[in-house]
Image: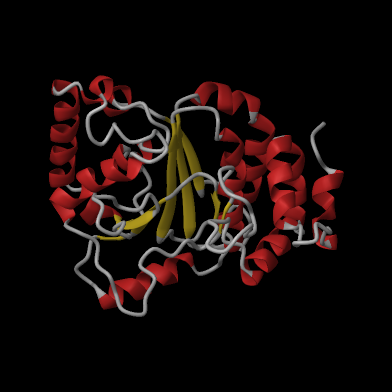
Amino acid sequence: MSKNQTKASDLTLFSALDSDKYEKFVLPFIFFPLAANEDVRVEVHLKNYDSFIESNAGGLQILEQQFGNRFAIHPLKGKYFNILPCGSTSRFFTEPIFRSKWTKISDIDLMHVENHLVNDFDELEKEKPSDTYFALKRGQHKKISGTLCVKTSEFYSSEWRQNLESYFQNVVEEDKLRKKTHPFDQPFYYHDEFVNYDLIVPVHGLPSSIEGKNVRPIQGIHISPNRPPYPEFEGCATWGISEERKKAIQGLMSSQAFSELLPHLAQEMNELLEKICIDKSFSFHSNCASIQDHRIL
């Protein structure tokens, strides 16, 4: 298969941003899953669409040459975005344009380097064939995990759209943002999963738990600027770098395709990727040395 040919897509990785803070992640968010999987597409919606396209023209051209029409970037539009300006929440009320069987709604800083993305959810479907989505409920809280996977056609239903309209009408009528009433009494970083709960559960019910199964597989490395890459103490939240994932991302970063994209990544992004390749004694692995060589100065 040539790099411009596409296989029927069974899963779309989907994210949306309403600020430029996390735009440095967009190019690698597109590259890694497409390089590792043939049956995946990527779709991203951006508030600062015009400026991003202009400033990242070179990198986007490389991605188009490598992956053809397997990814798309769109302007973030709609009245809901104007009602609730929150970069970590907009992906929950923005509907994807790609219509794959599955849509995995994801943080933009999650690098999907595993090569079995579709299979993980096909296996969950065998256990719960009538479920419209797979996610985690956060303990006793009315929160649904910010990373989840949905059956596209069943999830984005007329009932879902009606609930969306009612939810935001209530936010406006009650002036919840200005008054900081629930869930907007929570810190900015945390209230998004409360919103996700209110948009999903009235329509699709609570997510299922399946014994012995991970109903919210991460499938990659979560390069969160708010966490250390490796554990600093017991129970510390990290990027989730297993040996298997490290090997996978090192292989992808050693490819000719990545070497062509690398000069177009932001320096801060290169520095974050370097941290994956550093072991606990802070010595570099040889097949990540090219990142240092190609930093944008």
Residue 99 in the image: above or below residue 215? above
Residue drawn at (48%, 41%) of the image: 72
Q: What residue do we see at 18% from left, 52% from top? A: 201
Residue 21 location (% of width, % of height): 55, 30
Q: Position of residue 240 (x, y in %)?
A: 57, 61
Quarter of the view holding residue 120: bottom left
Q: Which of the pair 70/271 is nearer the observer?
A: 271
Q: 246 left or right of 26?
A: right
In which quarter of the view is residue 158 placed? top left
Q: Is residue 60 visible?
A: yes
Foreground of the two, 45 or 210: 210
Residue appearing at x 44%, y 60% in the figure: 8
Q: Is residue 218 left or right of residue 105?
A: right
- Looking at the image, how many numbered discs can be counted on the residues? 0
Residue plotted at (26% across, 36% down): 183
- The single residue placed furthest to the bottom in the displayed view is 212
In-front residue for pair 40/280: 280
Image position of 88 with respect to 148: above or below: above
Residue 162 lies, with reference to residue 233, above or below; the image says above
Residue 13 x, y percent position in the rendering:
45, 51
Confirm whether residue 265 shows in the render: no
Compared across the picture, whether 145 is left or right of 55 comes to: left
Q: Position of residue 262 (x, y in %)?
A: 74, 44
